[in-house]
Amino acid sequence: MLQIDGLGHAYAGHPVLRDVDLTVRRGELVSIVGPSGCGKSTLLRCVAGLTAPARGTIRIDGRPVAGVPGGLAVVFQEYGRSLLPWLTVRDNVALPLRRRGGTRAQRRAAAASALDAVGLAAVAARRPWQLSGGMQQRVAIARALAFRPSLLLMDEPFGSVDAQTREDLEDLLLTVRGPEMTILFVTHDIDESVYVGDRVVVLNGSPAGVVADLPVTLPTRGEQIATREQAEFVRLRAEVGRQVRKA
Ligand SMILES: Nc1ncnc2c1ncn2[C@@H]1O[C@H](COP(=O)(O)OP(=O)(O)OP(=O)(O)O)[C@@H](O)[C@H]1O
């Protein structure tokens, strides 16, 4: 679905990414981790068509990315900046659907069903600033879901909520992801990368490239604590940690 070949980028002559190769199948959820400042957000910006890479190619369904791809949705860490404070929660979720066409009634129905999926049907008429941080991030997720993106880019999406809410949002993501939705999930949190990912890709080096690409094959995925206690989870977490920390 997504194919990145020989991607390289530099800011003002300072190289950040070099020779990044990554292939992601449709419906896969790929976690991307790496040391702070190694270029994870830059990689997402290139995939989103917001930054033109200096080298290499990015293809989505075989077509080179030139500008923001049609079926793309993004969820960033700063939910406060991504929701419009003067619109209701429902209208925030429905807003991007205008790009998809359809009637106002269809957009409202899609927004209602996405809000229902994230457990926020009851607050559809409120404004984002009347909600907690975790609820606002659920609105951002609902907005992405309502759009039914073929590619969802998430950059530290749960970075600014408390630990319990973070776990709830991780489980929510795993519940609502669909077979048609390919997800790139950037996180600083090694545990989280293993918990949500089908694969964990580690970027490292200066300039950074892919130093590890680890499939996550847990015997079962269940409740948070039990999953994190599994021997395979512990092994993967250690391996990802080693790859992130190695100089
Ligand atoms: N627009 C820009 N102009 C100049 N330098 C930039 C720009 N954006 C990012 N950089 C630099 O490029 C490097 C990679 O930044 P990027 O945000 O992609 O890394 P990151 O891995 O996402 O970081 P973090 O984990 O801290 O969020 C950093 O050194 C950063 O300072």
Image (cartoon, grey):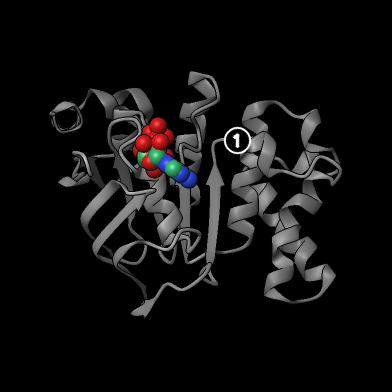
**Residue occupying the far front of the picture:** 13
Give the residue pinned by disc 1.
Answer: 78
Q: In the image shown, does 156 or 123 lie closer to the viewer?
A: 156
Q: In the image shown, does 7 or 141 lie closer to the viewer?
A: 7
Give the residue type that dot 1 points to: Glu
> Judging from the image, what secondary structure is the residue with disc 1 in?
loop
Q: Quadrant of residue 136?
A: top right
Q: Eyeballing the image, is 113 above or below 136?
A: below
Point out residue 56 in the picture as x, y percentages from the top left corner: 27, 67
Point out residue 33 in the picture as x, y percentages from the top left corner: 30, 38
Which residue is rendered at x = 36% and y = 52% of the image? 43
Q: Is residue 184 visible?
A: no
How crowded pointer 1 is (Cα within 10 Å; few <14, some 14-19, many 20+) is rated as some
Q: Dividing the image into 4 quarters, which one contains the N terminus?
A: bottom left
Point out residue 23 in the picture as x, y percentages from the top left corner: 24, 63
Point out residue 131 in the picture as x, y percentages from the top left corner: 75, 29
Q: Dividing the image into 4 quarters, which one contains the C terminus?
A: top left
Q: Quadrant of residue 161?
A: top right
Which residue is rendered at x = 18% and y = 38% of the image? 205
The residue at label 1 has a CB less than 8 Å from ligand 1? no
Q: Is residue 220 visible?
A: yes
* Ligand 1: quadrant of the figure: top left
Q: Eyeballing the image, is 182 above or below 36?
A: below
Q: Eyeballing the image, is 47 above or below 64?
A: above
